[in-house]
Amino acid sequence: MTKDTDTLARQRRQFLTLAGVGAGAIAASTVSPVAMAALPELVSHDSVDTAALLFPESGRPYDPVTTLNGWSLPWRMKNGVKEFHLVAEPVVREMAPGFTAHLWGYNGQSPGPTIEVVEGDKIRLFVTNRLPEHTSVHWHGQRLPNGMDGVTGLNQPAIGPGKTFVYEFVARRPGTFMYHPHADEMTQMAMGMMGSWVTHPKQYSNNIGKVDRDFCFLLNAYDVEPGSATPKIMTMLNFNLWSWNSRLFPGIDSFNVKLGDKVRMRIGNLTMTNHPIHIHGHEFEVTGTDGGPTPSGSRWPEVTTDIAVGQMRQIEFVADELGDWAAHCHKSHHTMNAMGHDIPTMIGADHSGLAAQIQELVPEYMVMGERGMADMTEMTMPIPDNTAPMMTGDGPFGSVEMGGMFSVLKVRRDQPKQSNVNPGWFKHPADTVAYEFKGEVSEPKRSSAGGSSAMPMKNGVTTEVRVKKPGSHQH
Ligand SMILES: [Cu+2]
């Protein structure tokens, strides 16, 4: 056995152990013996759970990241070069329990595996294309030779179906990066082709410090008609599924940390709109972008940071408040899953007696939303097969009424170190939960006065609004 294959076998054993699969569960991570001779081992992954940390067994040491509902790609060391093998291919991704999408991704998953290297590493990436059309990979944010930048037509010919290309460069800059195709981008990113990349620093500094927990995930969006499985690739802005690493709440794993942990989250946006990411109960600082670490003197506290299209944000905080804290995109329609049809606002509309009359004509008609949309979570309305419920998630106090880009930061005193094991719901100390007031509530005094104007009109002129009803043809 050569040193390389030895390392390889060790990594595979470690990978299988870390992925939580034992003997007899080989299907979860398969190995192609054909590729062994020349190419690095082809590792594929079919679990949607957050994989355990992949600790390096060769090369420079580093503290590995946790990829939310994802995993890191093992490598082999060959003559001092870290070799990775990415395979672009169609994948089946369970985006939430009960909803599976047909996406494109890498090595069995969308997003692809996280690639972790260390500043100064020499890297060789084999990219095999098993898609029905050509592709390429752009290494977003990296300093590299121009011909390795991955823009089809500009820097390299496209990687045709069935072809394998090789990218080689040195990881010059430590930080938070991502990768995605630069060929038929609108299709390939709408289908889920992307992955995270972390270049760990050779040594920690004021600007890049050591943390106890290091999470990474990508923001992505899809347009999948309820009841179908394949994203509509011509959609430009009107996406209906807002996901983290191609998972939707309640399918997104929680961030499970120990009280006092220094926590880092690396978040990249490959959707077509911005996402204000908000974390409850703590203040964080943006400690880096895909452009590099922010100088420590330039940081200020936030509880929400907006991540624009094509940007990455690296945030850090000390998890010093026990509890189950919401972590979500602050655009409220991004914490909902697909709606089958456009529903008008019905708050305040009186439906009494109307439903029965309409049901004589349309037997399946039902009234929605006259008290807001919260009732939707309790409704047993039939939805098409393979559809993520619009708002769901059972919490300890009832439905969380969320979907899409929503998860929970769970801070616990007894959480094992560096473990993402879900500790269950928070047990609130006595008298620390909001409670119902049972006494009398008096009616408030209400004012009937109209508003004033900063620029009063001269002669008390009023504006007359004429309303034309649809179908009336008066002139
Ligand atoms: Cu959003």
Image (spheres, helix red, strand yellow):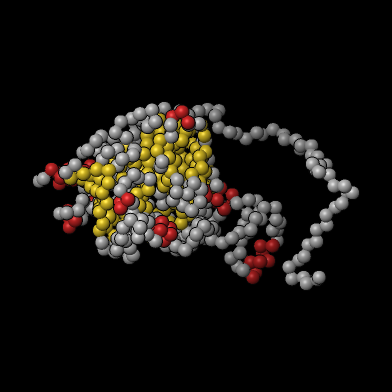
Image quadrant of residue 434?
top right
Q: Nearer the viewer, residue 253 or 107?
A: 107
- Residue at 32% x, 37% y: name it: 200
Q: Nearer the viewer, residue 197 or 121?
A: 121
x, y percent for residue 267: 43, 43
Image quadrant of residue 339?
bottom right
x, y percent for residue 183: 37, 59
Q: Is residue 252 above or below residue 351?
A: above
- Residue at 56% x, 47% y: name it: 332
Position of residue 187 in the picture relative to residue 30 (left or right): right
User: Extreme left residue here?
Assistant: 1
- Residue at 69% x, 33% y: name it: 439
Using the rendered image of the protein, determine whether residue 38 is visible from the camera's viewpoint.
yes
x, y percent for residue 153: 35, 60
x, y percent for residue 225: 48, 62
User: Extreme right residue here?
Assistant: 459
Q: Nearer the viewer, residue 452 or 343?
A: 452
Point out the image quarter for the C terminus. bottom right
* Total count of labels: 0
Using the rendered image of the protein, determine whether residue 17 is visible from the camera's viewpoint.
no
Image quadrant of residue 254?
top left
Position of residue 64 in the picture relative to residue 227 (left or right): left
Q: Is residue 284 above or below residue 249?
A: above
